[in-house]
Amino acid sequence: MSRVISIDPGKSKCGLVLAEISEKKVNKAIILKSELIGNYVRNLITAEDISKIIIGNGTTNREIREKLDFFKKEIITFEEKNTTYRAKSRYFELFPIRGLKFLIPREVFILNKNLDAISALIILEDYCKMKFTLNENLDFKTWLK
């Protein structure tokens, strides 16, 4: 089993997903304040066997890498261009609109959503060159912790 963490770094918040590569499944998805990322990942790697961390190369990449310097395995910087824009479309692939809601403009459903965790998922999918599905028990948190 090969578990990886993917991070969409940001100035005030970061999106993070934990995925199982061999199963193509996302087991955890969260958005948290940037200053909490180091402690969150430290706690996560004590509970999970993480083989690598993939971090988007955008905003605050260097600062986030410094917060993860305790991680002694591979940390990869990967292109994240347009992931926030692409996250809007990916959101509807993961959570399709059903019923009469289909008549309402799609943008209404994502106005108050933070899509950073979906951006982290896109970084992972681009890196692995494959689509991931969500674990059926996944609580896909789209708010700050």
Image: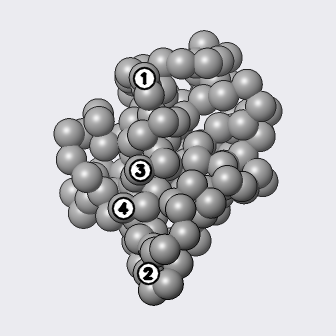
Residue with the most extreme bottom position: 99
Residue 93, label in figure:
4
CB-based contact (under 8 Å), mark 4 and mark 2: no
Q: Position of residue 125 (x, y in %)?
A: 31, 43
Q: Pick whichever, 85 or 56, lies toward us.
A: 85
Q: Is residue 137 visible?
A: no
Asked if marks 3 and 4 touch (Cβ < 8 Å), the reply is yes
Q: Secondary structure at mark 2?
A: loop
Cα separation between marks 4 and 2:
12 Å
The mark found on residue 122 in the picture is none
Residue 54 x %, y %: 43, 32
Under tag 1, what secondary structure?
A: loop
- Where is mark 1, residue-wise? 81
The image quarter in which residue 74 lies: top left
Q: Quadrant of the N terminus?
A: bottom left
Q: Secondary structure at mark 4?
A: helix
Amino acid type of disc 3?
Answer: Ser
- Tell me if residue 134 comes above or below residue 64 in the rendering: below
Query: Mark 3, mark 1: which one is toward the viewer?
Result: 3
Q: Residues within 10 Å of mark 1 (few under 14, many from 20)?
A: few
* Distance in Å between CA atoms under marks 3 and 1: 15 Å
Asked whether residue 15 is in view, the answer is: yes
Left or right of 20, for residue 53: right
Residue in the foreground of this view, choosing between 61 and 38: 61
Say which of 54 and 9 sits in front. Answer: 9
Q: Residue furthest front?
A: 103
Amino acid type at circle 2 is: Arg
Amino acid type assigned to the residue bearing label 1 in the image: Lys
Distance, label 3 to label 4, CA atoms, is 7 Å
